[in-house]
Image (cartoon, grey):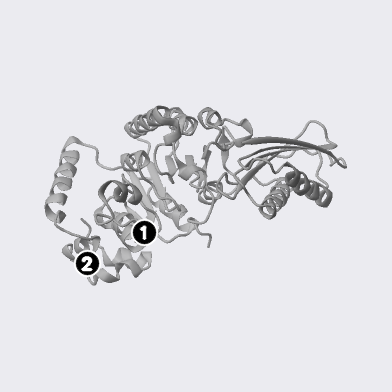
Amino acid sequence: MEALHFTFSGQSLSNTSHKPVLVGVVGSGNLEVLIEPATDASTCIVEIITAAVGFGAIWEAVIGDFVSRRKPAGIRVSINDVGATPAVVSLRLDQAWDSYREGQP
Amino acid sequence: MTSYYEASARDRVNGVLDPGTFHEIVPPSARMMSPHLKQLDQPCAFDDGIIVGEGRLSDHPIAIAAQEGGFMGGAVGEVHGAKLVGLLERALETKPDAVVLLVESGGVRLHEANAGLIAVSEIMRAVLAVRAAGIPLIVLDGGQFGCFGGMGIVAKLCDAVVMSEEGRLALSGPEVIETTKGVEEFDSKDRALVWRTVGGKHRVILGDANLLVNDDLDAFRAATLDLIETKPDMSLEALEQEHSRLGQRIDRFGDCKDAVDIWRDLGIADPDTVPMLESAAFMAAIAGKRA
């Protein structure tokens, strides 16, 4: 297992308190993404625990792409991954961010 | 229609309960994860593969738990088990109209060895305490991984079981039987054989499950509501009758080589067509013919 940690600064969201959301499942080729409100409204903190060791650069690129496309801020993203492909990770991040903003459980 | 089989445990909970009523206890953000898996350097899940909480079903207060088969086959570890036991023990105090268990599990999580075994035994004890308190326990079984091992026993300790054709319920799973007894005894790759033997239809015919429903979240929800008043006869006389019925079952069907032989013996018309029937046609075909 490998733990990765990234911090991105972004635009500040309107300071509504959102409910935490969880999408995805910790299964082979899949991952779960938990999004919670962060204390700092202008940053996006991403913590990853992955079973696939040595892919830090790819994670940084995929998360960087998500941040530049969606401009998330004020959130803490926690990921448990079991070797999901970059495409799956991107889709899960979008799904989690959409659910979080819609306030779905 | 939303497939129960394809849905995640979280989506099943929200589909069975009235929309927006679910309140999760120890949610993923609590990060109550398995210490054993971490020690073994294995992937962990924020909810340890089980969702527990409370909600309403057509305004009935309900305690509900759902196992996520996608995480380690829904296997019961220490935290996973403790969450379920906690929900059951809480039900003794809050007295909901029913406890609904959306099972999907291969049984004990072997990584956690004794801690997992103890967890399963604690679940069984808590289930019996809830039953003794007169609170109905309803099991829903229609997930991708079925319900096996210790959770198979837990399911049968409950008051009622609802299954879809896709659901499976047994003690030893097909692979376990093949590994220990040989492929001649049971070919776990033969999907038709597996579903004929441990699938929802056979379980309903044998009386191990109460009801067969289509693979549809709404159908599971409706069946749960139908069974909410379930109060099986728990008198000594009824239990002795049940034991004698089970004893006769092995005498009567012990020579059958296949589930179809049992269906034929029970007088079900065209037993070979049973696997192809829709749930309503199936329930009609077996009416009055169940073991």
Q: For mark 2, give the secondary structure.
A: loop
Q: Quadrant of the N terminus of chain A?
A: top right
| Element marked by disc 1 | loop
Q: Which of B100 and B227 is in front in this view?
A: B100
Rounded to the nearest whole Å, what is the CA distance between mark 1 and mark 2?
27 Å
Q: From this viewpoint, is residue B218 visible? A: yes
Mark 1 / mark 2, whichever is N-terminal = 1
Whether residue B91 is visible, yes or no, is: no
Q: Mark 1 points at which residue?
A: B189
Asked whether A88 or B13 is in front, the reply is: A88
**Tag 1: Cα neighbours inside 10 Å, few (<14), some, or many (≥20)?**
few
Q: Name which residue lies at 70% across and 44% down.
A: A55
Going by the numbered disc 2, the residue's amino acid type is Ile
Q: Nearer the viewer, residue B162 or B196?
A: B196
Specify the subunit that label 2 lies on: B
Please state the horizontal and vertical placement of residue B6, each as a whole percent of the image.
Answer: 51, 56
User: Which chain hosts label 1?
Assistant: B
Q: Is residue B23 above or below residue B289?
A: above
Quick one: B95 or A18, which is closer to the camera? A18
Q: Which residue is drawn at 76% across and 44% down?
A: A57
Q: Mark 2 points at which residue?
A: B268
Residue farthest to the front, as pictured: A54
